[in-house]
Image (spheres, rainbow, N blue to C red):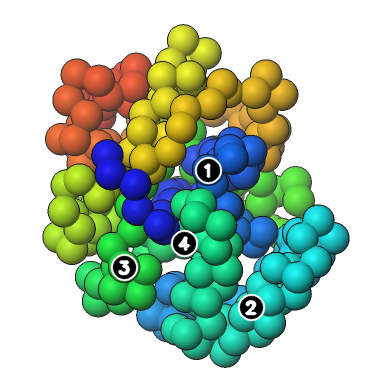
Amino acid sequence: MSRRPFFVGVGAQRAGTTWIGHFLRRLPDIRFSPIKEVCYFDAKHVEARKRVISEAMNTRLAVLGLGNYTRKHPLSGLRLCYHYLGIRKLSDDSYRAFFDELARSGAVAGEISPSYAMLDEDAVRHMDALLDQPNVFFVMRNPVDRLLSQYSFLSTRPGLKAPGGTDLTDALCTLCGQSFHVNYPRSLKTYRAVLPEDRFKTFFTEHLFDPARTQAQCDALCDYLGIGRSAVPSDRPVNRAPAVEISLETRAILAGKLAKSYSAARAIAGEDLPLSWQRDLALIDQT
């Protein structure tokens, strides 16, 4: 793949994008945004996300990321802070200047915002034009496993709250209907309608975290971004959440509700679809 100056990572919540961000941040050819989830395009284009950049949690994370970067790179960091003030006002010029600053040394610069899975075609066209046709990658995780991880995350993190219900199955079904970030068929259709095949690549969380495939998957990501390969570090930081155990019956119910996402992924991956996805598809076929 030819090297381009910018990239954007998209993916579902709880799909491993935090780990990917840690990996990319270590690479000498990459200047990863100090703010992993800038959320610029969803704040600009998705009505329900208009104020997301100014929310307290995102503000704290942005200040922490920019503060750490500025301590290591004082001049560049101060310029990034200035540009970020403009990003919070949804300024295209500031967003582009933010990444131009990161790419100043000739490195590839980018960010990962899972919420970009919510964008429509006009928003993706806006992204494509503003960043001069960036490379975009999309990360998917088994829909039921991702849902369970999201429920656990919401249930155990201070300040967050998982939906209630008459029982766990009911609560999970409720959350299933609220997970607007993870409509794989819609997201895939949107990005593939706007971007050419050579600038939109999909990855599966299960392949990335499979010890037998992790290095090859990271090599493929580096090749796609047009940068040098790097060994995957052994200290792999992952934003983990406690496991949630469910019955096979509940799994079948949830998989049925998410059947279109399984089918959309199968249409892309074919026989290389991860085993957990294949097992859930078998459950769907049996119901």
Determine which residue is flagged by label 2. Answer: 84
Q: How many marks?
A: 4
The answer to whether mark 1 and mark 2 are in CB contact below 8 A is no
Mark 2 residue element: helix
Q: Nearer the viewer, mark 4 or mark 2?
A: 2
Crowding at dot 4, Cα within 10 Å, few <14 / some 14-19 / many 20+, comes out as many
The answer to whether mark 2 and mark 3 are in CB contact below 8 A is no
On the image, the x and y values in percent for residue 9 come to 43, 51
| Image vertical order of residue 145 relative to residue 159, above or below | above
Crowding at dot 3, Cα within 10 Å, few <14 / some 14-19 / many 20+, comes out as some
| Image vertical order of residue 41 relative to residue 111, above or below | below
Mark 1 residue element: loop
Q: CA distance from mark 4 to mark 2?
A: 18 Å
Residue in front for this viewpoint, 95 or 270: 95
Disc with the residue nearer the chain's start (3 vs 1): 1
| Image vertical order of residue 83 relative to residue 8, above or below | below
Position of 163 with respect to 253 (left or right) is right
Disc with the residue nearer the chain's start (4 vs 2): 2
